Amino acid sequence: MFRDALLVAGKDLRIELRSRVTTNQVAPFAVLVLVLFAFALDPDRGVLGRATAGLFWVAVLLCTLLAVQRTFALETADGTRDALRLSGLDPAGVFLGKLGAVVAQLLALEVVLGVGVAVLYDTSVDTDGASPVAVVAALVVTALVATLGLGAAGTLYGVLAAGLRVRETLLPLLLLPVTAPVLIGATRAFESALDGVPSESWPWTGLLAVFALVYTAVGLAAFGPLLEES
Amino acid sequence: MSASGLRGTGTGASRVLGGLAAAGLLWVVVFGLVLSPPDAVQGEYVRYLYLHVPAAWLAYLSFGITALASGLYLWRRTRSLGWDRLAGASAEIGVFFTGLCLLTGSLWGKKTWGTYWAWDARLTTTALLFLLFLGYLALRRIPALPEVRAKRAAIAGLVAFIDVPIVHKSVEWWRTLHQPATVKVEDAEIDGLMLFSLFVGVVAFTLLFAWLLLHRTRVAWLEDEVEARGLDLAIAERLAEGRAVDAAATEGPEVRA
Amino acid sequence: MSGLQVLAALNLGEPGASSVLVGYAVTFGVIGAYTARLVARARRLSQRVPDEDKPWT
């Protein structure tokens, strides 16, 4: 299963490297979202600095939609779906592979967004209380777990909506309510970390871990039956 | 029943159920508006309790049924499109009552909190529940073979239901972090008659739900049946056309000759 | 209870009573509308399938 996963992930990432859609379109989109928030929220009143965590994760959520749409658009073109089915690859491995590719791209986007947010929103990290290492650890682990959850839920719903003409409008409606806990949890965790109390962020990270676990498990189980039929 | 004499989705048993439900709802009005006492704090507004709580109960009941039916469809030993139809019907009624729950909660809140909406844990979770199953209903409308659609919908239904406790927990943590619980609806001391009225509400609404579910599931069966027949009819017409063309073609050369 | 007694018991003089009445009316109105639509749909569809084929008849 893991070998198949690496195969699929490698394929998706190689396609990305050659077509550069994420770097050329999604990353600029992410920065654009940050800029739009600034237009909407009046940079002079300190709102952006205080709302940074939330705005960051909303931007990530929007990028997740794009990344998932893309990963399954790749499959509907040229009958690759049938090829995938006939290839004899373990469906669970295919799920993990697609998940891996999506997570990798999202993490890269989060780095971009992180830099963007630090630069554009003048975010202040209050380190009076805790060590910078603890704060960074909290931020990084939270981001990893949250992204895994987003990727798992996204890949699962991506295949549920795959191959349908209404996919573009159906996927957001299906995915966004489901990922609400991730938005809530990741934002609270980031806020606690940025406020200098990373210890308060770990319960939220725990919740995010549960989410990621549940959706990865469901995705592994459901991917096979879903890929089976057209 | 109808002009052409064909029977509808009602049966003897369903009419009894319907009658009981109607009677129950009448009792809700009587107890809710007349017999139960006004609250010491909220006055008459507490009467919304007898609508809001039963609606919330139905929301969770219906989505539970959707999840259960989805699971039964996915399990090979019990796979049957009947479960899929039940899941869909229950979800539609569930979305309706979730909306009603939000509506009554909103009207109630306007009077007691002064605002139509508050981001408290319960209301927020209910709003997310509403959106979750709205998405499920949208997925059910995709054009696809019944089995394909049923499988996808079943997985979506189960996943949505699994998400509910996670949503509930995260929203609850979130909203109790910064503010203590707002005016709680079920106060520590609830008057006996109020409790009974609430009980009447829950029972009556559950009867209504059962009646609606019965009919909605049968309507789902009818919809699938009509579509299948429509398909059969179209196929039969095409076949007839084809035979007519064949007949004309085989006779043609002889006629001309 | 006679109509007048019911009305009296409804405490219409109390603050909020009328708005609660409106709330109840809206709620039951909406339930009625959904029920009516469902029944109409059921009747309409029932016409297109012969009785013998319906599993509940």
Image (cartoon, coloured by chain):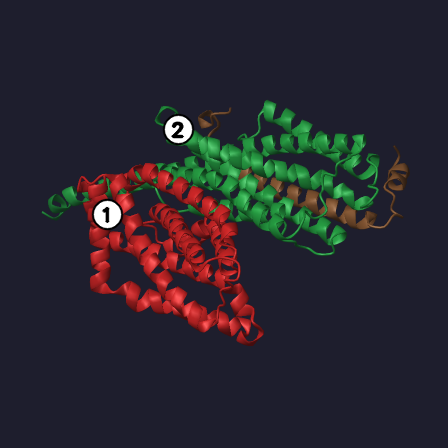
Chain colours: A red, B green, C brown
Residue A81 - label: 1
Q: Which chain is home to disc 1?
A: A
Q: Residue at x 87, y 48 (%)?
A: C14
Farthest bottom residue in view: A44
On residue B2, which mark appears?
none
Residue at 43 percent across and 72 percent down: it is: A119
**Left or right position of B163 against A147:** right
Residue B11 sits in which quadrant? Answer: top right
The C terminus of chain A - image quarter? top left
What kind of element bears circle 1? helix
Q: Residue at x 82, y 47 (%)?
A: C17
Identity of the amino acid at label 2?
Ser
Q: Secondary structure at mark 2?
A: loop
For the residues tagged 2 and 1, is the chain the same? no
> Which percent across, then down, holds residue B180?
67, 48
Crowding at dot 1, Cα within 10 Å, few <14 / some 14-19 / many 20+, comes out as some
Read off the chain for label 2: B
A116 lies left or right of A71: right
**Residue B121 visible:** yes
Task: Using the rendered image of the protein, determine whether residue C47 is visible from the camera's viewpoint.
Answer: no
Say few, some or many: other residues with alpha carbon within 10 Å of mark 2 (under 14 / 14 to 19 / 20 or more).
some
Which residue occupies the foreground of this view, B220 or B59? B59
Eyeballing the image, is C45 above or below B176?
A: above
Q: Position of residue B38 (x, y in %)?
A: 83, 41
Q: Write down the residue under mark 2.
A: B80
Q: Residue A62 location, x and y as percent?
A: 42, 60
Amino acid identity at mark 1: Arg
How many marks on residues?
2
Left or right placement of residue A24 versus residue B154 in this view: left
Q: Nearer the viewer, residue C15 or A53?
A: A53
